[in-house]
Amino acid sequence: MNNTDKVCKAIAEADALLIGASNGLSIAEGYHIFANNAMFHHQFGDFQERYGVRSVIDGCFFRYPDENTRQEFFRRLVQYWVKDYRPSQVMKDLLAIVEGKDYFILTTNADTHLELSGFDPDRVFELEGTFEQALAGKPIEDKNRQVQDFITQCHGRRLVLLELGIGRNNRLIKQPLMQLAAGEPHATYITLNLAPELYIPESIAPKSIGLEGDIAVTLSELKGKLQSLK
């Protein structure tokens, strides 16, 4: 049985899924907050010319000369990345993978693509807030209680910790997921990422599976195999 088959078996048999999603998932969709690419030039080229802003993440934290300019950046970001967004194949595949499962998602992507793609907003915790909240000046919605309740309910059950595109040194999502995997006797830790960022510590290696490569391709393969099992 190869690793893809092992992942499918773990997900199929799981009582619940706790999913962590970071930049790698957005990049798989074609949205790259760190990139100075053609999309950024099209959407924010004037900000680059006027202020030297080099990427979306740079623009989010840039010290603009006034609040109106900052608001304009976020208005445009919300328009292009949220209001104009249509669910990608990546999100459709992920939604199919979790279909029928109890799940909760932790993410730092801020673009609300998960919610816009059909995932239950009550089961998604935007840990660093959303672009729309930044535009409106609203505080981050704290869902720590929901997360803890979910983890408590999953204790001792067959829990899959599914990590999507999270950097190897990430402390906000990856570290807690690895710690939870270590403490839960029936947990399976699954991480999808490109080779340089794929990391599994030796302490949880026996209960872990890493799938290296393009997340879009991997999710498509997992969806296909899982559907064949039903």
Image (cartoon, helix red, strand yellow):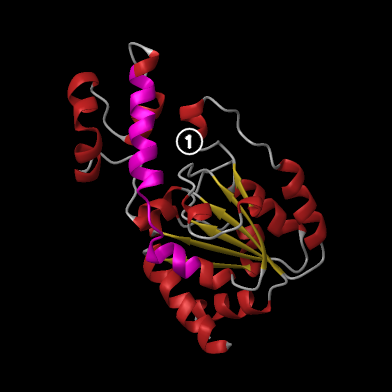
Q: Classify residue 54 as left or right of residue 230.
A: left
What residue is shown at x 34% (from left), y 46% (from top)? 32
In this view, 206 is above or below 69:
below
The part of the chain drawn in magenta is 69-94
Residue 66 in picture, x, y percent from top left: 36, 11
Q: Secondary structure at mark 1?
A: helix
**Label 1: which residue?**
132
In this view, 158 is above or below 196:
below
Specify the quadrant that holds the C terminus.
bottom right
How many tags in the picture?
Answer: 1
Q: Amino acid at mark 1?
A: Glu
The foreground one among 226 and 43 is 43
The residue furthest top is: 65
What residue is shown at x 76% (from left), y 61% (from top)? 184
Residue 86 in picture, x, y percent from top left: 38, 56
The foreground one among 174 and 124 is 124
